[in-house]
Amino acid sequence: MSQNVERESMEVDVLFVGAGPATLASALHLMNRIEAHNARVDREGGDPIEPPTVLVIEKGAAVGDHMLSGAVMNPKALAELVPNFADEGFPTEYICDNDMTYVFTKKRAFRLPANLPPFKKRGYHIVSLSNIAKWLAERCEAAGVEIYPGFAGDKLLTEGNRVVGVRTGDMGVDKNGSPKSTFQPGMDIYAKVTVLGEGVRGTLSKALISQFGLEGEQPQVYETGIKEIWKIKPEKHRPGRVIHGMIPHELIHHFGGMWLYDMQGDLISYGMVTALDAESPHNDPHLVSQKFKTHPWMRELLDGAELVRYGAKTIPIGGMYSMPKLYVDGAMLVGDSAGFCNGEKLAGIHMAMKSGMMAADTIVDGLVAKDFGTTTLGSYQERYRQSWAWKEHRKARNFHGSWAKGLPFFFLNEPVRMITGGRGLLDPVPFEAGHEATRRLAELPESKRERESFEFDGKLTFTKEHLVGFSGAQHETDQPSHLVVADTDLCRDVCAEEYGNPCESFCPAAVYEMVPDEEHPGKKKLFIHHENCVHCKTCDIADPYQVITWTPPEGGEGPDYTQM
């Protein structure tokens, strides 16, 4: 049906997919660079750049709705983009003046006398990424950029080996795939250059990387971050505080850690990151985050507190060797879609913004040359190699590999890695994709084959179903599930036996549930609660069979992270 329907089309010069820090910084920097170029031409002569038509499409109902981050932001890129950002009303909550690392045992908490280098955050800005996106969007629109929220990129438009634009998703389709009375076909948007900044594991970015063979030297690996906003007692609030913590091994199946920082209005952001390359198929980021709140230190902090918001997001932590090629004929990748994240420091906003700015500089080259082929766009990759972002990425390039090889190697390799500028004992340190690291139940000790039970108290710890209500997630139930499972029989007949249906564990929003199958007595079939989805992409990443594909739901639907 969607292939035969008549569609409207439009043409623009530059198309950005996703309204995040990378794309919005790119659009704003592009307009600033064009203005500076034309001013120089007025003074010195030459050919001006005709004002281009620049469009940003965003799947959220409003810019910022889908922006979730543990945001203690290095202001380095922002200062390059908007030098007077403080005078321009940039939405800083606080500036960190008290950064610290804690080591947690089962019952106690110890502050290290000296903060660990990756967690030195003094002078960084404590921010809401949602508010950053809104602030950048206002400046983009003032500069002449068009922004269309509520439009999800659904398909790449290509001609041969060239990307020529994007098709947005159809709206008004029922769960059987038939058009409803509200049916509105997606639009074909043609562009001279398309910049994909959809965040982690974006639908179009994933397709681009696969279709054009852009994979990095090593697989990309991910963590799932669980984030909660709590309103605490005023006497416990500490403006400027930023804590990173190493948590007890018994709480987690693999690598992970916690963060906590204070926001205005007596709010704190508490979060937990859990690596998705764990051996256990019962790896459950939500459960880890809930269990840690029962630690005496957390109990005391949250005594008398009120939960305000909940969300989840995956983070690319593979590092420099996991990054894909950044460009093809007619398109570029920026931000998390390209792996611009420092996994060692859990920091990506500044790198995402810098990637967008480098992409914008490359687009200016294309506008001057009237060419957006691989020769012109290839300068984006070279700009990256000459930037501070590359130097930062290079220093952290073997961090995840060290962890993936186990604690003995990590503690042996880390001092060498720091002395050798990020190299360490091996370069690169090889590792598996997360889903390849998951072991079958039969390969685990008997004591680890059963899923862990936990009693949620409804005051400090909450079920996934309860927490989804604090994410603001809204999806029309009468539409095709945007979570596509290629073979549900596999879930019933094979995965149940081999892995124990890990989708029920790794999803932080209770989207996947195995229910009794009346047609196959004694077995269970998969039921998908797609309306619960918080768009974290964990399922697309962690499924051991790689048969789950996350696709955009109708434009505008999803979580609401405006308070995050």
Image (tube, grey):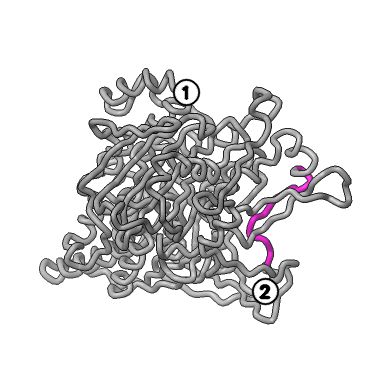
In 3D space, how far apart are the residues under numbered discs 2 and 1 (Cα atoms)?
Answer: 53 Å
- Residue 220, numbered label: none
Label 2, residues with CA under 10 Å away: few <14, some 14-19, many ≥20: few
- Give the crowd class for mark 1: few <14, some 14-19, many >=20 residues within 10 Å: few
Q: Residue at x 29, y 75 (%)?
A: 142
Where is the N terminus found, in terms of image quarters?
A: bottom right
Which residue is the site of mark 1? 406
Horizontal side of 275 relative to 348 (left or right) equals right
Look at the numbered disc 1 and give the secondary structure of its residue: loop
- At x 39%, y 34%, the residue is 246
Membership of 555 in magenta stretch: no
Between 538 and 383, the one nearer to me in the picture: 538
Q: Is 485 covered by the magenta stretch? A: yes
Q: How many marks?
A: 2
Residue 194 location (% of width, % of height): 44, 60
Q: Quadrant of the C terminus?
A: bottom left
Residue at coordinates 42% horizontally, 30% vertically from top-left?
105
Determine the residue positioned at 23% across, 45% down.
98
Q: Is residue 102 above or below residue 312?
A: above
First-in-chain label (2 vs 1): 2
Whether residue 392 sits left or right of residue 307 in the image: it is left
Helix, strand or loop for disc 2 = loop
The residue closer to the viewer here, 519 or 563, is 563
In the rendered image, residue 540, in percent from the top left (x then y), is placed at 59, 47
User: In the image, which residues are magenta?
Assistant: 479-490
What residue is disc 2 on? 5
